[in-house]
């Protein structure tokens, strides 16, 4: 997707094929997939690329930014400023900024950050490669250099979003939903399996709407059914479902295939009817309760991850109490929450006054997270004594560290296995093992592999 506003005619030329590049990815896993594809294109053109180095040393730095909410924007700006300082010290030759933040604020950033050589939007990978003196290889446009451990990968099935939630700037940045074809996605899965990938985190801005633009109907169930049948796929985990018009046939696919994890990331945001309506979520309180009951009934043992918001314009104490009661009832195995941050250009910013004081937002957020902490501790303790399948992600100190099917990388609890309790040569990264859970704390489980 090329945007005419992304012109850099006043910037310095960026020719430099064969140099060293540090690529820093900020924000979500969807950005990470973009970075992995860009890295592959750069490597095909002779560049040596280091991803997310703790101490960047390359001649060129590329920052793939996030522009979703205030904190993410601040993180992106701070990273750019750090690298700009390195450039001023003569330690960096070229500084390039791409991604969501520059997609949205190109002109402002260009004015405010003259130290940056070039700005690009979220979809300008081909232009970046060309401006660096390389040739974009269209035949390799879906190839990636994985930055994750070699046994798992993120699988982005669509870009953009057709929803118009009042608080969200994502459709402004990425545009309407654009689904990839089932055939293309399955081919990517097969190629990644051939390279040793066993676990797939299926991601999209709005997973459950997959295929409506391409096939005229929701096709997420059919897609997951197809992926599950690819030999070598051990685990499939689903991220970022939308509750309104949830495709119930997806639950049948989860029941049918053992390699589709009993895990669903479904952002609910709130529960009170007044807040759901104001947020333009197209679902009611009763429908949400009914949906949670249906999911848990149809897929026994499923772990639900959700995201909730406090402090949206007009949220009353009664609304917030409804939210607390809902969380007590639902007992989400995994939950994140954040305080509303007004985003320019959104429906909420244009139609509502941001009238919940910041101190009230933060107090509500703290109270909500304290409640979830208690629930999480109960969920973790309930696993003690069980034997669970665990994939080993890494070694750290005296422990091998892995995850169950109920845990997504980076955001969910982990399983710690003490090296001294193992027999033989220990464990291998990417290995699936049966582990007896011996103890638990608020965040993690501790176990011993079965003999």
Image (cartoon, helix red, strand yellow):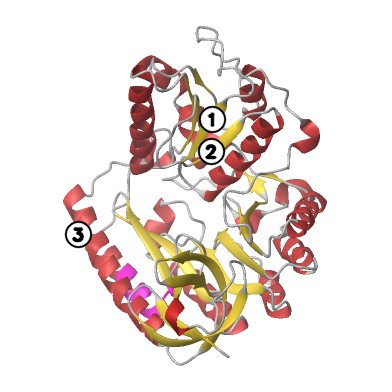
Name the image quarter holding residue 301: bottom right
In the displayed structure, does residue 15 sit left or right of residue 320?
A: right
Q: Which residues are magenta?
A: 322-333
Picture residue at 62% right of the left edge, 27% below the top? 124
Q: CA distance from mark 2 to mark 3?
A: 41 Å
Q: Is residue 219 above or below residue 450?
A: above
Query: Could you tell me how far apart the alpha carbons at marks 2 and 1 are, in whole angstroms?
Result: 6 Å
What kind of secondary structure does the magenta stretch mostly adopt?
Answer: helix
Residue located farthest toward the left when viewing the structure as drawn: 359
Which residue is denoted by mark 3 in the rendering? Answer: 363
- Residue 329 drawn in magenta: yes
The kind of secondary structure element at disc 3 is helix
- The numbered mark, 1 or 3, whose residue comes first in the sequence reads 1
Dot 2 alpha-carbon crowd within 10 angstroms: few under 14, some 14 to 19, many 20 or more: some
Which label sits in the foreground, 2 or 3? 2
Tag of residue 21: 1
Which residue is identified by label 2?
A: 50
Query: Which type of secondary structure does the marked residue at label 1 adopt?
Result: strand
Residue shown at the point (33%, 37%) measured from the top left: 74
How many numbered marks appear? 3
Residue 247 x/y as whole percent: 66, 66
Seen in the image, is 412 located left or right of residue 142?
Answer: left
């Amino acid at each position: 997707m090329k945007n005419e506003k992304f012109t850099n005619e006043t910037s310095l030329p960026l020719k430099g094929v064969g140099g060293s590049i540090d690529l820093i990815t900020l924000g979500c896993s969807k950005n990470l997939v973009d970075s992995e594809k860009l890295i592959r294109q750069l490597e095909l053109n002779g560049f040596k690329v280091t991803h997310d180095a703790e101490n960047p040393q390359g001649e060129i730095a590329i920052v793939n930014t996030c522009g979703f909410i205030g904190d993410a924007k601040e993180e992106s700006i701070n990273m750019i400023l750090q690298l700009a300082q390195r450039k001023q010290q003569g330690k960096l030759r070229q500084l390039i900024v791409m991604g969501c933040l520059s997609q949205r604020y190109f002109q402002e950033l260009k004015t405010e950050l003259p130290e940056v050589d070039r700005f690009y939007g979220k979809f300008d990978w081909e232009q970046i490669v060309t401006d660096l003196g390389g040739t974009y290889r269209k035949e390799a446009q879906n190839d990636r250099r994985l930055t994750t451990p070699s046994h798992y990968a993120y699988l982005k099935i669509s870009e953009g979003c057709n929803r118009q939630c009042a608080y969200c700037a994502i459709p402004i940045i990425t545009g309407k939903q654009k689904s990839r074809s089932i055939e293309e996605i399955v081919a990517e899965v097969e190629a990644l399996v051939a390279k040793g990938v066993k676990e797939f985190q299926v991601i999209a801005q709005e997973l459950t709407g997959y295929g409506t633009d391409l096939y005229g109907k929701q096709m997420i169930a059919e897609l997951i059914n197809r992926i599950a049948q690819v030999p070598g796929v051990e685990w499939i985990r689903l991220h970022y479902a939308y509750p309104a018009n949830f495709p119930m046939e997806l639950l049948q696919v989860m029941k049918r295939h053992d390699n589709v994890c009993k895990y669903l990331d479904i952002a609910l945001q709130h529960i009170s009817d007044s807040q759901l309506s104001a947020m333009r979520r197209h679902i009611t309180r009763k429908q949400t309760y009914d949906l949670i009951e249906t999911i848990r009934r149809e897929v026994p043992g499923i772990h639900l991850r959700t995201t909730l918001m406090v402090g949206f314009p007009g949220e009353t104490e009664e609304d917030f109490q409804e939210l607390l009661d809902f969380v007590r009832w639902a007992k989400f195995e995994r939950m994140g929450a954040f305080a509303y941050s007004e985003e320019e250009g959104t429906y909420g910013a244009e139609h509502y006054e941001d009238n919940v004081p910041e101190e009230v937002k933060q107090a509500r957020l703290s109270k909500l997270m304290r409640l979830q902490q208690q629930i999480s501790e109960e969920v973790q303790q309930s696993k003690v004594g069980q034997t669970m399948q665990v994939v080993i992600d890494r070694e750290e100190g005296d422990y091998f560290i892995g995850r169950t099917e109920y845990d997504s990388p980076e955001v969910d609890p982990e399983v710690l296995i003490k090296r001294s309790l193992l027999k033989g040569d220990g464990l291998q990264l990417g290995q699936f093992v049966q582990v007896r859970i011996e103890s638990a704390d608020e965040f993690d489980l501790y176990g011993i592999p079965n003999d």
